[in-house]
Amino acid sequence: MPPPKKSIKIDSGERNPKSESPSPKSGGNAAENRDADAASAAENSTETAPSEGIEQKLEAATREAAENYDRLLRVSAEFENYKKRSARDMEDFRKFANQELVKDLLPILDNLELALKSASEKDKSADGILEGIELTRIEILRVLEKHKVKQIDALGMPFDPSYHEAVMREETDDHPENTVTTELQKGYLMHDRLIRPSMVAVAMPVKKENPPAGG
């Protein structure tokens, strides 16, 4: 009986690929998930960044517009005030351009009035001259009135430091205290602005003498 045959297994070096390759579900899914999360985050950041930038620019533009509008209002108000102030200055200049000339004419009126007063008290024969002086005085007053210059009524009026300059006090019982009793020099207004105060004497009570002691 022949002996049994021995089988010899020869290793060719080839291995079963299925036995050594890793499972596709074990590591592949995790990598794919990470890649998907990264792509989603990148997409979200890409969408959010431009939106935030636009909002910031819009807020800055709104603030700038509000500041410019406020500045415009202030400049407009200042310009209106400037126009009103300039108009007042021009009106005052027009009204009072001749003020210095009027002041220079007032002493002439003073001299005419003094001449009238002196001549009427001393010489009754100079009626013709006095009439001429009076007409001259009236004509000058008419010209001054045309330029809104008028005399201040002081005689018999209560003393007013805004229009009167007291140069003396006069004891009298005929007038209340601080009443103008004498007008030494006439005062004048121009457009209701004082250009010269009236020089006046003001009333004061007469001092009562004390009776002698034991009387």
Image (spheres, rainbow, N blue to C red):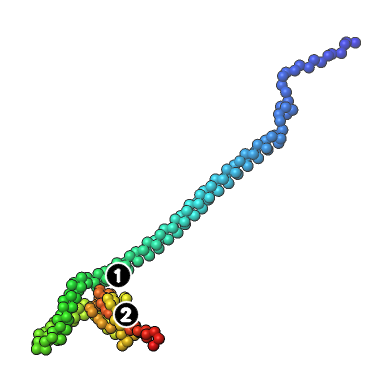
Q: Which residue is mark 2?
A: 159
Single out the residue that lies furthest toward the top: 2
Q: Is residue 55 above or below residue 99?
A: above
Q: Nearer the viewer, residue 112 or 83?
A: 112
- What is the crowding at mark 1: few (fewer than 14 residues within 10 Å), some, or many (at least 20)? few
Residue at the spot 87% in from the left edge and 13% down from the top edge: 4
Could you say whether the residue bearing mark 1 is in a helix, strand or loop? helix
What's the residue type where badge 2 is placed? Phe
Location of residue 65 (image quadrant): bottom left
In space, the residues marked 1 and 2 are separated at their CA atoms by 31 Å
Looking at the figure, which quarter contains the N terminus? top right
Dividing the picture into quadrants, the one containing residue 38 is top right
In front: 61, or 183? Answer: 183
Q: Is residue 55 left or right of residue 177?
A: right
Residue that appears at 71% across and 29% down: 21
| Residue 100 visible in image | yes
Name the residue: 9% across, 89% down. Answer: 125
Where does residue 5 sit, x and y in percent of width and height? 84, 13
Q: Give me the disc on residue 68.
A: none
Per the image, the residue denoted by label 1 is 88
Q: Residue 28 in the image: state x and y as whole percent.
A: 67, 35
Q: For the C terminus, give its image quadrant.
A: bottom left
